[in-house]
Image (tube, grey):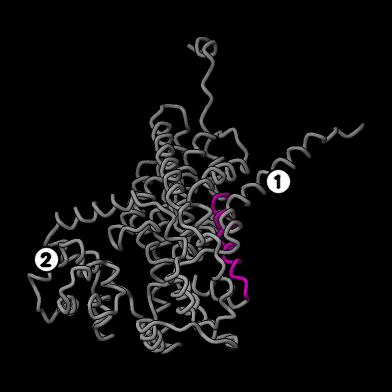
């Protein structure tokens, strides 16, 4: 007998390779055009914190050149960092940034972003195929939605040396586990758990997202029948436990090994004050010796400049005109930050309607903010990132020569195009979710949980921190991603003759 020709396999295999290659290029388009990664002012802070931790194990590289000079406020930051460390930065991500930056290969962080994103999407799509007939292979379900999403903010966040891309990784994995966790093989489930656990510890907002996703996951379990329906709920609760344990371990290790105090920033307190309910509550009850936040209330009175009452100024500003929290003694800062959850509950109990309205208003504002402008460093961000890193000038070449900073005129048109794609994508998702029989119920549930995740991200970041374009655009690319996915897996309508024969 002669072997059957396999001539059809090679073109299909070549097509698959080309599809994957094009997807990778599109996802890395911003990195390629920019000739290097994008970054934020706090990217330098991540390196500084990670480098300090690495220095406990590996000797720090010698600084041969002059260090970029810091401003007065940043000089005070450095003095305080000798005795304290920020609890708002993820040590895991700080170590990742520091390891690659020490090796003069900061672009490697972008490679990690893309690789782990592809893994998350592959795990979800591979499992979803076992819940319904999609008519597509796994590679198509992974690459085509990412190609569509690549026309919006996705390539910017892959190239961004900040942990924001992992917000979407977390949401994709939670949605995949809710729908298809029961169909996952053991190694796939463990890989999803490990990747989601890594994502959830990379930013404080991820803990809030994981906590708020738990009720939705539990509700999905209650509405489903069959073996393993509580698997996803256990998955979500496990992520919350991991995030809390990581925070506790970080504090213990910092205080016992590095001999530093951990200071958390009071984002919740600042948000409540700026929105009104928190300030009104403090006006009513302060001074009160058992309420540490009264010290912040007093600090806010040190200046009559109205611009001091913004969340960013309350948390970060050090000038006498606009500063408050950072001008307080370290002990008072720690007490205010430690009290922020209790303060939120007190304000909620005293002014429930005003607090809930403010949270909802901020979340709605956040949903409308999706520009990529905060991923593009300006001169102030560049200098701050260099200064916070504490590195000499010869180690900062990767932060210079950023192509996308030479002309900012493209940002406006890009935002308009992105907004149009987001709006059209949401329309497609809504139609396909409401169209009976067009998409399998399990695949609709995946899309619905992606939408829930986007809304939860807006509530956490807008309601608790501060509405910002960075927080919106980091997940908004999931809209075209999900729309493309639903279009791919929709069922073909039966021909009219076929319909008549079945009646």
Name the residue that disc number 2 marks. 280
Query: Is 239 included in the stretch rendered in magenta?
Result: no
- Residue at image position (58%, 49%) is 122
Q: In this view, does 12 lie to the left or right of 95?
A: right
Q: Where is residue 96 in the image (x, y as percent from the top left)?
A: 54, 71
> In the rendered view of the protein, which quadrant contains the N terminus?
top right
Q: What element does badge 1 sit on?
A: helix
Main SS, magenta residues:
helix
- The span shown in magenta is 104-122
Q: Is residue 464 left or right of residue 440?
A: left
Residue 231 seen in this snapshot: no
- Residue at image position (24%, 83%) is 328
Q: Position of residue 70 (x, y in %)?
A: 42, 82
In this rendering, the answer to whether 382 lies above or below 335 is above
Label 2 environment density (alpha carbons within 10 Å; few <14, some 14–19, many ≥20):
some
Please tell me which residue lies in front, 257 or 431: 431
Q: Tell me which label, 2 or 1, sits earlier in the chain.
A: 1
Name the residue that disc number 1 marks. 17
Q: Residue 254 carries which label?
A: none
In this rendering, the answer to whether 211 lies above or below 301 is above
In this rendering, the answer to whether 314 lies above or below 79 is above
Residue 265 seen in this snapshot: yes
């Amino acid at each position: 007998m002669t072997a059957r020709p396999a001539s059809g396999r090679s073109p299909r295999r070549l097509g698959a390779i080309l599809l994957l290659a094009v997807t990778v290029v599109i996802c890395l388009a911003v990195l390629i055009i920019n000739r290097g990664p994008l970054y934020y002012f706090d990217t330098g802070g991540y390196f500084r914190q990670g480098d300090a931790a690495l220095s406990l194990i590996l000797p720090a590289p010698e600084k041969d050149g002059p260090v970029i000079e810091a401003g007065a406020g940043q000089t005070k930051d450095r003095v305080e960092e000798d005795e304290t460390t920020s609890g708002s930065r993820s040590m895991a991500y700080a170590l990742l940034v520091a390891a690659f930056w020490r090796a003069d290969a900061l672009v490697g962080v972008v490679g990690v972003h893309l690789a782990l994103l592809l893994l998350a999407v592959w795990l979800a799509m591979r499992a979803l195929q076992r819940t319904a007939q999609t008519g597509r292979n796994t590679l198509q379900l992974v690459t085509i939605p990412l190609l569509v999403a690549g026309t919006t903010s996705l390539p910017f966040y892959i190239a961004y040396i900040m942990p924001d891309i992992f917000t979407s990784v977390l949401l994709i994995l939670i949605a995949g586990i809710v729908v298809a966790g029961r169909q996952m093989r053991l190694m796939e489930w463990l890989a999803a758990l490990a990747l989601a656990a890594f994502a959830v510890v990379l930013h404080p907002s991820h803990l809030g997202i994981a906590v708020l996703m738990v009720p939705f996951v539990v509700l999905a379990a209650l509405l489903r029948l069959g073996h393993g329906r509580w698997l996803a709920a256990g998955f979500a609760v496990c992520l919350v436990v991991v995030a809390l344990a990581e925070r506790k371990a970080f504090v213990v290790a910092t205080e016992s090994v590095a001999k530093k105090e951990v200071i958390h920033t009071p984002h919740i307190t600042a948000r409540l004050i700026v929105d009104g309910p928190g300030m009104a509550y403090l006006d009513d009850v302060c001074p009160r010796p058992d309420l540490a936040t009264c010290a912040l209330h007093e600090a806010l009175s040190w200046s009559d400049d109205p611009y001091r009452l913004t969340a960013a100024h309350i948390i970060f500003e050090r000038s006498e005109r606009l500063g408050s929290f950072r001008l307080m003694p370290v002990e008072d800062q720690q007490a205010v930050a430690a009290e922020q959850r209790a303060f939120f509950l007190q304000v909620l109990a005293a002014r429930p309607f005003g607090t809930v309205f403010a949270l909802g208003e901020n979340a709605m504002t956040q949903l409308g903010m999706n520009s990529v402008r905060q991923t593009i460093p300006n001169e102030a961000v560049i200098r701050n990132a260099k200064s916070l890193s504490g590195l000499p000038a010869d180690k900062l070449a990767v932060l210079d020569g950023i192509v996308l900073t030479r002309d900012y005129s493209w940002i406006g048109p890009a935002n308009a195009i992105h907004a149009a794609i987001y709006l059209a994508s949401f329309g497609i998702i809504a139609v396909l979710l409401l169209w009976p029989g067009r998409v399998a119920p399990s695949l609709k549930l995946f899309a619905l949980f992606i939408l829930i995740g986007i809304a939860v991200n807006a509530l956490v970041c807008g309601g608790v921190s501060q509405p910002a374009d960075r927080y919106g655009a980091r997940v908004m690319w999931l809209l075209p991603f999900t729309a493309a996915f639903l279009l791919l897996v929709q069922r073909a309508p039966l021909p009219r003759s076929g319909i008549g024969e079945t009646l």
